[in-house]
Image (cartoon, rainbow, N blue to C red):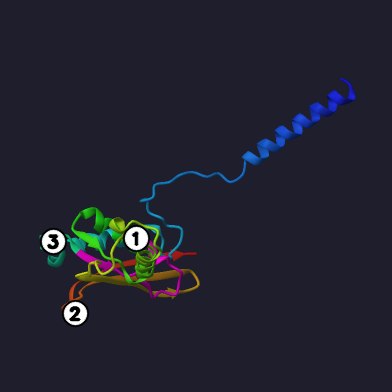
Amino acid sequence: MNMNSKFLYLTAILLSVAALTACSGPQVRYGDAKAVETVNADCRSTDLQMIAESMTRSLLQTKAISGSKDASIVTLADVKNKTSEYIDTRVITDKIRTQLMKSGQVRFAVSVSEMQNQTDELKRQNQSGLYKNSTIAKTGNMQGAQYRIEGSIASIVKNTKDVKDVYYVFNLNLINNEAGLLEWADEKEIRKTATR
């Protein structure tokens, strides 16, 4: 074997070893999104799913929603996080909204957090001069919500040297906007304990 052949042979071996080493990095696998997650006592995806499903079932059974001939028009405020940990409460809010929409019993009016985008779009269509008048979404035609849904999640955390105990409580309320009455309220409790 001449020097060039040896060099090419060694280069090929090194590249093969490098490729195999690169492929042996962290192993990634898909899991069941609904499987119970028990990594620690913090609020996790399993908890958020249980909360959303429980609250949605309860809300759809309330007289204000189930007793209406037409789909009730509601707004849904972002769930407030009153815990000491970071929880992306938008996940809970979006899951509740999706499940309520799928039921066909609820329609959503633009919420407070989405109102700026809505007014910007109406201004763009009505004031830019770029659109045919017959296709413009006219101002003054938005529908007001009959009800608003508000919720929060809070926790009580107790720690010892060996145990972390967390009690979560999630509250959701349905308020009649015109009458100012609380039409429905429910809560979901979760207790998680982790030992070290």
Q: Quadrant of the N terminus?
A: top right
Q: In the depicted view, which residue is nearer to us: 154 or 66?
A: 66
Q: In the depicted view, which residue is nearer to us: 38 or 179?
A: 179
Label 1 with label 2: CB-CB less than 8 Å: no
Q: Earlier in the sequence, mark 2 or mark 3?
A: 3
* Residue appearing at x 50%, y 72% in the figure: 161
Q: Report if residue 76 lies within the magenta region.
A: yes
**Residue that label 2 marks:** 180
Three-letter amino acid code of the residue under disc 3:
Ser
Looking at the image, can residue 172 be seen? no
Q: Report if residue 25 lies within the magenta region.
A: no
Cα–Cα span, label 1 and label 3: 21 Å
Quadrant for residue 101, please give it. bottom left
Three-letter amino acid code of the residue under disc 2:
Gly
Cα–Cα span, label 2 and label 3: 20 Å
Residue 189: x and y, percent?
A: 30, 68
In this rendering, is residue 111 above or below 12? below
What is the span of residues highlighted in magenta in the rendered image?
73-92
* Residue appearing at x 36%, y 62% in the figure: 125
Between tags 2 and 3, which lies in front?
A: 2
* Residue appearing at x 17%, y 77% in the figure: 178
Q: Which of marks 1 and 2 is nearer the N terminus?
A: 1
For label 3, the crowd category at 10 Å Cα-Cα, with few meaning under 14, some 14 to 19 and many 20 or more, is: some
**Residue that label 1 marks:** 94
Q: In the depicted view, which residue is nearer to us: 38 or 96?
A: 96
Three-letter amino acid code of the residue under disc 1:
Asp
* Residue appearing at x 28%, y 72% in the figure: 150
